Image (cartoon, helix red, strand yellow):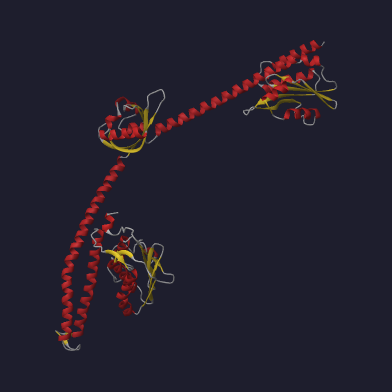
Amino acid sequence: MRNLLREQIFFEIAMSLGNSLDMDAMLRESLPTYLRKLNCLAGLVVHARHEPDGSVRPEVRHAIPRRLNDNPAVRSVRAILAEPSTSREWQEFAASLPLFGRVGDMAYHIMDLPEFGAIVLIKSGEAFDAPVLLSLQDINVKLARACVSCLQAEHTEAMNQALQHEIEQRKKAQENFRRIFEEALEGIFQGRPDGSPINVNPAMARIFGYDDPDHFLREMRSFKTRYLHQSDRNRFVALLREKRAVAGFEVEMLRRDNTPIWVAISARIVEEPEDENFVEGIVDDITLRKQAEQELRQAKEEAEKLNRLKTDFLSTVSHELRTPLTSILGFTKILGRHFKKATCPSECKFSGLPVNRIASNLDIIETEGRRLTELINNVLDLTRLEADRFDWHMGEVDMNNVVEHAVEATRVLFEEKGLKLELHADRLPEVSGDRDRLIQVCVNLLSNAVKFTPEGEVTVTARAGEGEILVEIRDTGIGVPPEETEIIFDKFRQLGDTLTEKPRGSGLGLPICKEIVEHHGGRMNVRPAPDRGSVFWFSLPVRKAGEPNPADPYQARNL
């Protein structure tokens, strides 16, 4: 009778297993038959999943009914199978099956599914006896084989899907590479070590004057024939062999019609284990850039030539003007002195003009002559500075003496205009420089402060900072508009509108002062005063004892 039952169950389960490789579908069809024929209330098919770390984690693959959490027998089984184990521990557990247990009026049996996991049967009443359990072994083996076949099919399907995904990704990558290769604006090439081309893109063909890559490969036998100078190719090959990769190598080559072009080559050697090594790289046509650089270079040379001519002309004219002007000033002073001594009182007339009028005119000639002399001297200084022919007399300079000398030299200007002049100076360290030129800077800044300060005061401050000396001239004058602070040190630029206002100087004093200060390694600028007016300042570096002075031409040559 039991054999007949086993045969009947085996036949129906075998029929339900069929040839399906879908585990869920197969278990949905076979497990209900299994449970029904054995009068079981519930059943679980458990997969012993082997993890990459070597552990075994039991996983319920199929259960009938689906929700068994409220069944105490199921909870007991789950507790037994819940903990992960090692592979050896699982093998020992599988060898101990079948396992029987009872919870209340429920009995459970855990039976081995070889090479797959286990099957759990839960029934009420009496448990299965040993002969029935023994008769179910063949059915369990059949079920286990079906589950293993399904797992293999799932794994194969997963591998097929992964392989298909990889194939699709590679196709996309190849399509992207092909699109980049075909549509790139730069030339892309592959070539053999002997210089013969392997493959080029359309841009490469266009750069060298060919219709398309096929045309290029048919006619271009070797890259080496396209170098304008073979010495350039030798340098490129030597660099490539030494460094294995070269970037931005600029060289002149020949197009198909032998017209020269400039290109920048970036290439590397690709080493193949089995095949011959080859070279691949990018070629960029830089002909237009090179032409622009050549035009800029020529324009710069022309501008420098014109600047030298201008400098020489100004220097010559300044010398030629200064000689007669010196004579005019000298004779004007002599004439003025003798005229005032030799003539009658101021109410007298000389040649129809009052004597005081003639004397005033002579004073104007002398004043304007001095102003013209200052302009000529400034132009001459500027041309010498630009031509790097300025005479420098470098030495150790006492900056306290420089500042005090400049204040005393300009004090009469402040007194004539009724302006207050104050000096606040710390004890300053010595600097290396040209004393007369540094006095010239201070005198010029003080003279400008007088010119542009209608009323109020001018304060000179000199102090030592970290590695430098700072001199500030603060006035209460008209100030410098923010938009003019960047251009006030430009040559021939003056504060205000020179078309509507009378010029107050040549516009060369500040640029010359800036050149002098920067020659000494310092800085010069202007900023608004807190209340009104401006603060012109310059700084000079303090050279440590024994440190070379780069501003000294002799020391600079020996650095």
In the image, residue 139 sits, relative to residue 70, either above or below, namely above
Can I make out residue 187 in this image? no
Q: For residue 253, what is the image quadrant? A: top left
The location of residue 512, given as percent across then percent down, is 29, 64
Q: Residue at x 20, y 83 (%)?
A: 357
Side (left or right) of 348 relative to 292: left
Count the labels in the image. 0
The residue nearer to you, when weighing 105 against 237, is 237
The location of residue 140, given as percent across then percent down, is 73, 17
The residue nearer to you, when weighing 442 against 47, is 442
The location of residue 205, given as percent across then percent down, is 33, 31
Q: Residue at x 40, y 28 (%)?
A: 271
Q: Residue at x 30, y 40 (%)?
A: 287
In the image, residue 505 sits, relative to residue 2, either above or below, namely below
Q: For residue 369, what is the image quadrant? A: bottom left
Side (left or right) of 61 relative to 390: right
The location of residue 503, given as percent across then percent down, is 29, 70
Query: Split into 4 quadrants, where in the image is the C terminus?
Result: bottom left
